[in-house]
Image (spheres, grey):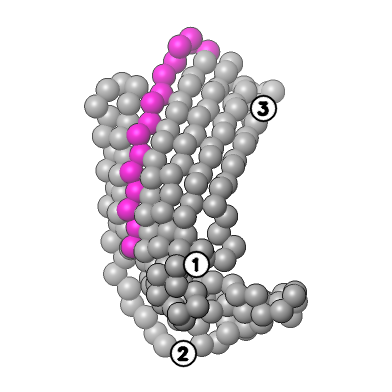
Amino acid sequence: SEQSLQFLPRLAVSLHPARFLSVRAGVARGFRPPTFSELFGDRAGIIGNPALLPELSEMVDASLRLAGRPHKRVELSAEVGGFFTSTRDAIVLRANSQRLVVPINFGRTRTAGVEASASIRALERIELAAALTWIDARIKESEAAYIGNKVPFVPEWDVDLRVRLRPLPW
């Protein structure tokens, strides 16, 4: 087994040029070693691959958020942001047969996307939230047959809807 020491700097900035407006941005490096089931399998659907390398990534994101209180008992917010991630030695599950997958390393992948979200909170007891994310994840470096293809198991669209009710003042 190979030992690794990684320098993982992260920097985030949040500016509030107006009471209702927030501008956020961040950059970071990431490191993810393979999981136990990726390395050795799970006796069910994953065939292990003990030769996997850890993932290394660089990420940048930025967002713009509007928030306000049109009434003393109602809070509204809306946010739109974008992100870009470049990953080296990305660990991806590749179908090996009808019911089995094997984790492999792709040389380099690129993931970019845009997310929009909105929420409303009323009476300090009810919260409704929704988020829509578009993701484009592509293989940039690998075996020739995979270059330019989408990264497996990364959805192009992701929708998150939430309702939270707090009937008692906990």
Callout 3 crowding tier (Cα within 10 Å): few <14, some 14–19, many ≥20: few
- Looking at the rendered structure, the kind of residue marked 2 is Ser
Decide which of tag 1 and tag 2 comes sooner along the chain: 2
Q: Is 87 on the left-hand or right-hand side of 7? A: right
Q: Dot 1 lies on which element?
A: loop
User: Which residue is depicted at the point 36% across and 39% down?
Assistant: 63
- Looking at the rendered structure, the kind of residue marked 1 is Asn
Q: For residue 28: magenta?
A: no
- Image quadrant where residue 142 sits: bottom left
Quadrant into which the C terminus falls: top right
Give the residue at the far bottom of this rendering.
1
Residue 89 in view (yes/no)? no
Q: Which residues are magenta?
A: 58-73
- Image quadrant where residue 139 sits: bottom left
User: Which residue is depicted at the point 44% across and 15% down?
Assistant: 69
Q: Which residue is mark 2?
A: 1
Q: How many marks?
A: 3
Q: Is 112 on the left-hand or right-hand side of 121? A: left
Give the residue at the far top of this rendering.
71
Decide which of tag 3 and tag 2 comes sooner along the chain: 2
Residue 8 versus residue 40 in the image, above or below: above
